[in-house]
Amino acid sequence: MTIPRIVILTGAGISAESGMGTFRDAGGLWTQVRLEDVATPEAFARDPVMVLDFYDMRRQRAEAAEPNAAHYALARLQAARPGEVLIITQNVDGLHEKAAQAEGADPAGLIHMHGEFANGLCAGCGHRWKWPGGRMTVESACPACGARRVRPDVVWFGEMPYRMDECFAALAACETFVSIGTSGAVYPAAGFVAEARGAGARTLELNLEPSEGAHYFHEARNGLASQIVPAWVDEVLAG
Ligand code: APR
């Protein structure tokens, strides 16, 4: 991929209007379940049945969800500017892929730094594969080594996010950094704006309300992603 001029970070807020919910808003997922019970390697070791059931429910919700106008607008931007726009998403819901497919955008322009529901991962040999669908249980076997230690390919708290070298290289070279639908509560993603700004990029936050990192941005626009993201994309494409 060429060096992207525009780097976009997305979080749960871009998928909120697709019915995926968020984590830290009122009624968010972490106000309903303890992340220590479902989103750490220790939780998986302690109670794999509960963790796998939790992720099966989340995966089914994502499979049934449709992208909203914000996802489609970003895919439209990527299709109009091939190679120039990188999306780094914290989301695991696959909605950027669904929108990219509809808009003819190159899926190479997307980095899943927190993994994705679409894959299975073997906790034994590390093999990763497209999950064929159906329930992931403690009886599920790794297609590579046969071990019955299959887990969702999502990055849990205490684990290293994926493809960080590529993310930081893009942040160091981009002209514009846009953060959409994230609270700025979780690093390393929350530090991306400082990296980009320090490297000279123009920084913009598009979020329902000012995030914890709002003060790092040159500009912030608050509102529903389904409204403010397409409006921003239209401005970029008209520019
Ligand atoms: N449009 C725009 N922004 C929205 C909308 C919306 N319709 N609804 C909510 N938001 C904003 C909220 O104001 C909040 O700032 O989206 C943000 C969601 O924040 P979080 O719930 O903390 O989600 P996120 O930032 O993606 O969490 C980061 O934490 O739990 C981990 O791995 C998980 O990737 C996740 C990471």
Image (cartoon, rainbow, N blue to C red):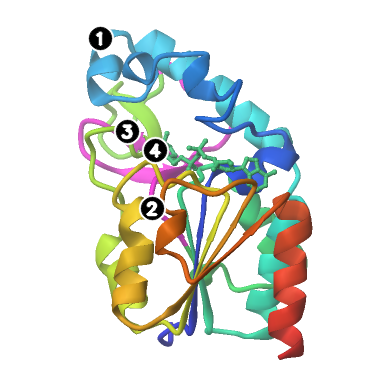
Specify whether tag 4 is near ligand 1 (CB below 8 Å): yes
73 versus 184 height, above or below: below
User: Residue at the location (41% across, 82% down)?
Assistant: 174
Q: Is residue 119 magenta?
A: yes
Classify 10 Å Cα crowding around label 3: few (below 14), some (14-19), many (20 and above): many
Q: Read off the magenta span.
A: 111-139
Label 3 close to label 4 by CB (< 8 Å)? yes
Decide if residue 100 is on the left or right side of residue 142: right
Q: Quadrant of residue 234?
A: bottom right
**SS of the residue at dot 3?**
loop
Residue lying furthest bottom = 239
User: Residue at the location (63% across, 76% down)?
Assistant: 78
Residue tagged 1: 46
Residue tagged 2: 113
Callout 1 amino acid:
Arg
Residue tagged 3: 156
Callout 3 amino acid:
Trp
Q: Earlier in the sequence, mark 1 or mark 4?
A: 1
Decide if residue 150 is on the left or right side of residue 17: left
Q: Earlier in the sequence, mark 2 or mark 1?
A: 1
91 versus 72 height, above or below: above
Q: Is residue 198 magenta?
A: no
Distance from Cα at disc 4 to Cα at disc 2: 9 Å
- Counting from the top left corner in percent of width and height, residue 18 is at 73, 40
Callout 2 amino acid:
Met
Quadrant of the image where one finds ligand 1: top right
Label 4 close to label 2 by CB (< 8 Å)? no
**SS of the residue at dot 2?**
loop
Is any atom of residue 25 visible in this view? yes
User: Residue at the location (74% across, 41% down)?
Assistant: 17
3 versus 208 height, above or below: below
